[in-house]
Amino acid sequence: MSLKQWEDKILETPGVNERVREIEDELRLAAGLTALRETAGLSQRELAKRIGVSQPRIAAIERSRNITIDVLEQYVQALGGHLEVSVVQGQQRTSLLKPDLE
């Protein structure tokens, strides 16, 4: 079986499109978090110290799709930002989480 034949067979598998989208979302989140940290000029170890966790925990956060809002908020705040969560339906935007900007 050639690589092209194998690829065609895989792409015919039921549910493959949904799984590809999930993987893309995972990669987008991981790349986004890593880019934020690197833009702030911090290593995983330095960010871990700011949050009060281990460096391996930061690595796990950066590669995980299933992180809690609390963890994501701590991560973003340690980089000097704030987290906002909104739902967008057409032209309607509803904020679910607004930062406490005191």
Image (cartoon, rainbow, N blue to C red):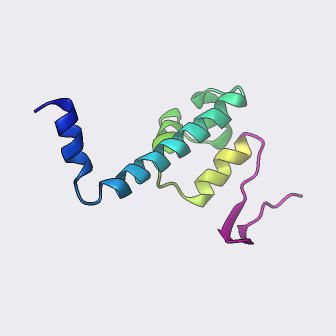
Locate the C terminus by quadrant: bottom right
| Image: magenta residue range | 79-102
Say whether residue 55 is magenta. no
Q: Position of residue 37 (x, y in %)?
A: 65, 34
Question: Can I make out residue 83 in this image?
Answer: yes
Q: Position of residue 59 (x, y in %)?
A: 49, 36
Residue occupying the far left of the picture: 1
Who's the residue at 69% across and 46% down the image?
A: 76
Displayed quadrant of residue 38 = top right
Of 89 and 37, nearer the camera is 89
Displayed quadrant of residue 16 = bottom left
- Vertical placement of residue 74 versus 90, above or below: above
Say whether residue 85 is magenta. yes
Question: Can I make out residue 93 in this image?
Answer: no
Who's the residue at 52% across and 41% down the image?
A: 30
Locate the N terminus by quadrant: top left
Q: How many marks?
A: 0
Of 29 and 56, nearer the camera is 29
Lateral position of residue 97 relative to residue 13, left or right? right
Who's the residue at 22% across and 34% down the image?
A: 4
Displayed quadrant of residue 79 = top right
Of 33 and 51, nearer the camera is 33
Q: Position of residue 101 (x, y in %)?
A: 86, 58
Lateral position of residue 82 relative to residue 54, left or right? right
- Vertical placement of residue 37 versus 88, above or below: above
Residue occupying the far right of the picture: 102
